[in-house]
Image: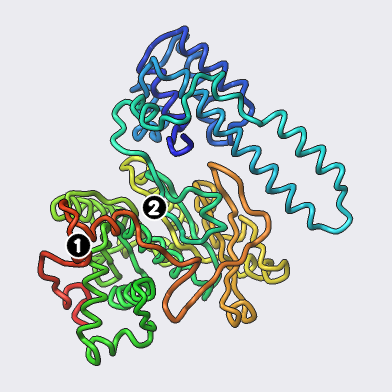
Amino acid sequence: MDNVDIKIRDIIFSLTCAQDNSLVSIIKDKLNNCGVLDVDEQVALDNFNNLCSELNSIPTSGTLVTSDNLYQTANTIRPESLADMTKLFINKKMRIKLGTVLTNSTMELGKPGVNIEAIIEKVSNALVVYNPKDVEEDKINTTDLESMKSKLHEVKEEIKGIKFGIDVVDQIYPGVTPGSYNIIAGYTGSFKTTIALNMCYIGMQTGYNSLYFSLEINKEDVMLNLLSLHSYNMGEPVKRSDMTKLRYTDPDKFDRILESLYALPGKIEIYDESDIERYSTTVFGDIIRKTDKMFHDKHNSKLDHVVLDHAQLLKFDTQVKTNDAYMVLNVYASYFRQQAAKNGYAVTLVSQTSRNGYEYACKHGGQYLLTGLAEGNELERGATFVLAAFINDGLKASGQLQVQILKNRYGETMLEPQLTNIKPEYYVVGNGYNKTPQQVESVFDTNGNFTNPFEVTEEINLDSLLGGM
């Protein structure tokens, strides 16, 4: 049941569609009094309350979308299901709130001089306040997921996010979802690009298509990084440093790795600086639309995820006269955030942290502050999710990286950095990957006969994929 992803904007948008004063009053009371909304949700509810007061009636859907463009991607719930869906939404928020209290309390227990009795009382109070109501009382059948999903009008599939592949992060954040605006932050050499590319790879495994703007390294190198990562997951690991010569020393193995990557359910399109005729929001927008159309025409799918690596390399062409790096970054950050919300794909910006931010982290066990992001306050202000990465010589020698959730609009943050594994020689970060259900099922045809899951029906142009390397 928790897999049914209901947002407060789905509920509010559906209220404007229903235009039922009695229903609006009931739902508003439940939401206003639940006490578990996060900041973004409370803002959405307050704005709706204000609109109702100003108009002295229920606003139309058009008026709602005009007031907040995030409603453009909202789902519509049938009026007869709204009460149950609202209860489910609130119960899920209560569980998240309770989980946050329990997690923070567990972390406090490890600190010296802590008052254990005070923590026990805090947890006990949270269990009373945030423990969701009895499900049977709320008349929600948690054993029938399909029945509940059918109540979501015009929803074609359950919304799932692209995971990071890092357990300590994935347990808290469901992954980047349509319309979200995410940041991977860290100082130079902290494996930000590795994390971003691993996300794209996990997306490919689970059927998501990515567009990767590599503004620092060329696309041939990005592809070789991805091939090394995939070879590790295949059980035929080839170090990144050996991947270039493998094409000539063992072309059969190289082709096998490339073809199996190409056969994954999701695809990736890589652009580097040589593909960008000039730097402007218009040019980036044209490339995004072109890529989305390509995925639609060639693969009967859509663009799901846009990655920009890294944000501080964004600039304007010479027609725009400015030396203000803050302004440039803020304009781009705002543009990509708005486009993600409008067009329903996720955006991830890889961002440098400032030197001051890095020096603070070095003195505090790798712990970053949100203000440590380099330049442009639009980065942290507009982000849905911010993940920070930190490494030093000791961590690198032990094959580990520290990660920390600095911002999470849909759940808890991470006060203390947590360790995760890295294998730089294979471009791997996190806990490794398993074959997805789509891949496992593809081993058998409709008659149950074994087939080659990596068989490619169309010819692969290696020179095209690797840029003529």
Q: Which of marks 2 and 1 is nearer the N terminus?
A: 2
Horizontally, residue 311 falls left or right of residue 43, namely left
Q: Nearer the viewer, residue 190 or 143?
A: 143
Q: Which residue is drawn at 35% across and 57% down?
A: 436
Of tags 2 and 1, the one toward the viewer is 1
Residue count near mark 2 (Cα–Cα under 10 Å), binned few <14, some 14–19, many ≥20: many
Mark 2 = which residue?
A: 347
- State the CA–CA distance, disc 2 to disc 1: 38 Å
Asked whether residue 379 is in view, the answer is yes
Task: Tell me the SS state at disc 1.
Answer: loop
Q: In this view, does 77 lie above or below 354?
A: above
At 49% from the left edge and 63% from the top edge, which residue is drawn?
351
| Residue picked out by circle 1 | 450
Q: Position of residue 52 (x, y in %)?
A: 48, 15
User: What's the residue type where badge 2 is placed?
Assistant: Val
Q: Can residue 216 be seen in this view?
A: no
Q: How crowded is mark 1: few (under 14 residues within 10 Å), some or many (20 or more)?
A: few
